[in-house]
Amino acid sequence: MTLAGVRLHCRPRFADTHRYFLTNPEPVGCADPELREPVSIPDRDWAGILSTNMPDCAHTEFSALVNYCSDALLPFDRILLHGVALRWQDRAYLIFGPSGVGKSTQAKKLQQLRPGEFGIISGDRPAAELRQDQILIRPSFWNGKENWHGAEAAPLAALIQLIRGPENRLEPLSEDAAALYFFPSCFTSGADEATLRRVAEFATRLLQAVPKWRLTTNQVPGSTELLLESVFPAPGKKEAT
Amino acid sequence: MEYQARPGIVLLKVCKAILLVPTRSVYDKCSVVLRLPLLDAIVWNAIVRGKSREDILRFYEGIRISPEEGERRLQAFTQRLLEHGFLIPRAENEDAPAAAPGTEQNSV
């Protein structure tokens, strides 16, 4: 399979994972002229990993596979992220936060309130690629429950942390404050210290590169409008910094 | 110290934030990421290196934290670490070094 421009060799062992690949034979939108040599995902002891470490997770095998794919991308300066990657004015905006917090809902509301302005790069697990002068957000073939995907990558413009709270609020976020929440949004097997350190370096590069916002939401329509006012200003208005 | 750091925990810096992160081998025992203030990170490293309670209290005194306040801080910190599985009783694993605690936390 080709993921974020890197060819990965993988032998998924479990039925669900295998079915997933059978139904997604062609990765969406990952064509890249810089294709490199294939990378092998080690044939891990998935059963051992899943039974001992994540006994309660309903999609453990899928999660484990994503994590190992993300690890395999690291030497290529790429990583998989958990979030919705939006495209707005040819730039990428990543909404991240825990599962169920409302990332997809925010994206839908943005599209409803400003039809035609927002595209989707990936609805669930975009890849980030560190380049010399920018961070590129790329689609993957894991598109989330809405099956949102796009074909074109875009340079990252901002990170938006989404949390639930008593009142709608949008505030700039320092990189240090964002670190605790962004780090778990970087997929990794967490297999060893060296891998975690690489992920930490990657997260640092991302956090230092772009503005970060925290959107606290208790009511989706109101909070989405905050985003529209400050992060995605209508034509003629200046984007807040 | 009657406790020691659980093996398989890593102290990381993301930007200037210091995070205590479990490796996969201990996800079933601790599954949160903690953010530590600098002093707690130093104390965590002391625990990893097997320093005694007295050593740590002396460290606090060395930076002008009173013995009472040092005691209180160490108690609160170790309690937090225990709560999230980052510390284990010495008897549980006699010969193991490990990783760190925090004031903020997030799921792995």
Image (tube, coloured by chain):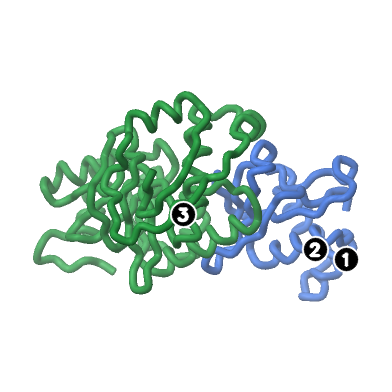
Chain colours: A green, B blue
Which residue corresponds to mark 3? A73
Residue A240: image location, x then y, percent: 25, 67
Camera-side mark, 1 or 2: 2
Q: CA distance from mark 1 to mark 2?
A: 8 Å
> Could you tell me which secondary element the residue under label 2 belongs to?
helix
Task: Identify the disc placed on residue B46.
Answer: 2
Q: Reply above or below: A123 against B54.
A: above
Residue A174 appearing in the image: no
Which class describes the residues within 10 Å of circle 1: few (<14), some (14-19), or many (20+)?
some
Dot placed on the residue nearer the N-terminal end, 1 or 2: 2
Q: Residue B17's image quarter?
A: bottom right
- What separation in Å lies between label 2 and label 3 (alpha carbons)? 35 Å
Q: Which mark is residue B55?
A: 1
Q: Are marks 3 and 1 on the same chain?
A: no
The front one of B90 and A177 is B90
- Callouts 1 and 2 close, C-beta under 8 Å: yes
Residue in view at x 58 percent, y 53 percent: B104
Image check: A45 left or right of A33? right
Residue nearest the observer in this picture, A14 or B75: A14
Q: Are marks 1 and 2 on the same chain?
A: yes
Closer-to-camera residue (A201/A230): A201
Measure the C-alpha gap from mark 3 to mark 1: 43 Å
Q: Amino acid at mark 2?
A: Ala
Which chain does the numbered disc 1 sit on?
A: B
